Image: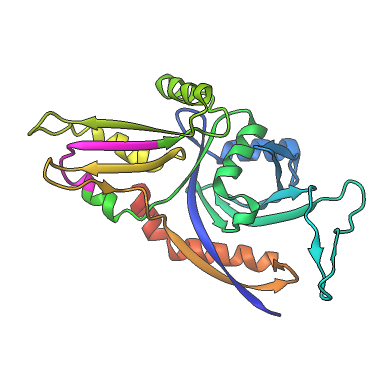
Amino acid sequence: MPFKTYKVNFAVPTVGDPGRPLHRTLAGLHEHFGEHWPPADVEGTRYRIRDLVPVGRVWLGTFAKLVDDLPHIIDADDQEHEIDLDPGDKIIDKCHFLYRGDTNVLVLQVNKAAGGITRLAQYMAHVAGVFVDITLVQNNDRLARVMQGQVYEIDIAFARPGANPEGIDPWSQVAFDMMRDTRAAHARFNLRSPRGGSMSEGVKRYIRDLAYGATVKKLKIRLTEETDLVDVVMSPMKDRIRVEMDGRYPVQRQVYEELEEAYARNRDNLRAALGR
């Protein structure tokens, strides 16, 4: 069989405000829906979770995009024609994931065609009826340097979430509502100390939260008036897996084994990045 290499991302999923680990919500939804969850529309495209099974405190599953508005294909003779589907059939594109309930870490096979973590969070929020936040784990070298110094300035840019963020901080909700009502996609917020001063140590708690915020697209920190702004949201922790292919898809059992291996390889770095 041929082999294929996939990128792997690591993320932290939380539910509601304050952000609770995903495992209880996941267990409740699994009890209600079983291993195949219902399709839901997310920004004009239908998605669903399939093949979800628990193995101890580890969950294995796939996140799928469903397509029925199909383009034509070109065959080996360079002839263009429609894809022959029966009524109700849909094309499915999916990625595999592994969720560790003991550490609240999601290990996701990267397949941009299937939607990624933003669409997964929006889908889960729709199905669960509560805000779901899935944030990539960042390599923490730059964040660690910031946390060891004094903070002079914070520059934040965030995007309007696609799903209704129920239960989040009221100030943030007002900001998101304003973006929605004005059809704005991005917003920016800046905090700066008086000249020659610095912010209190309490700001570092907000910096860590912002660094793992799903809607935060940019977080830059200036330690003193003389230093440059340092971007601390730019370097997600990654790995790669190599698996056998069975047709267009990788062998499912092997993907899960490789995702677990990727988690094991990065366990210490994940603990350091998440402060655990």
Which residue extends farthest front? 79
Residue 83 at what x, y percent from top left?
A: 85, 59
**Is 245 displayed left or right of 136 in the figure?**
right
Residue 208 colored in magenta in the image: no
Residue 151 colored in magenta in the image: yes
Say which quarter of the image contains residue 71: bottom right
Which quadrant does the N terminus fall into?
Answer: bottom right
Say which quarter of the image contains residue 124: top right
**Is 69 displayed left or right of 20 in the figure?**
right
Viewer can see residue 276: no
Q: Image height check: is 266 above or below 197?
A: below
Q: Nearer the viewer, residue 212 or 103?
A: 212
Give the extent of the magenta segment: 146-157
Residue at image x 44%, y 66%?
A: 265
Residue 130 at what x, y percent from top left?
A: 58, 28
Which residue extends farthest bottom? 1
Viewer can see residue 3: yes
Residue at image x 49%, y 22%?
A: 177
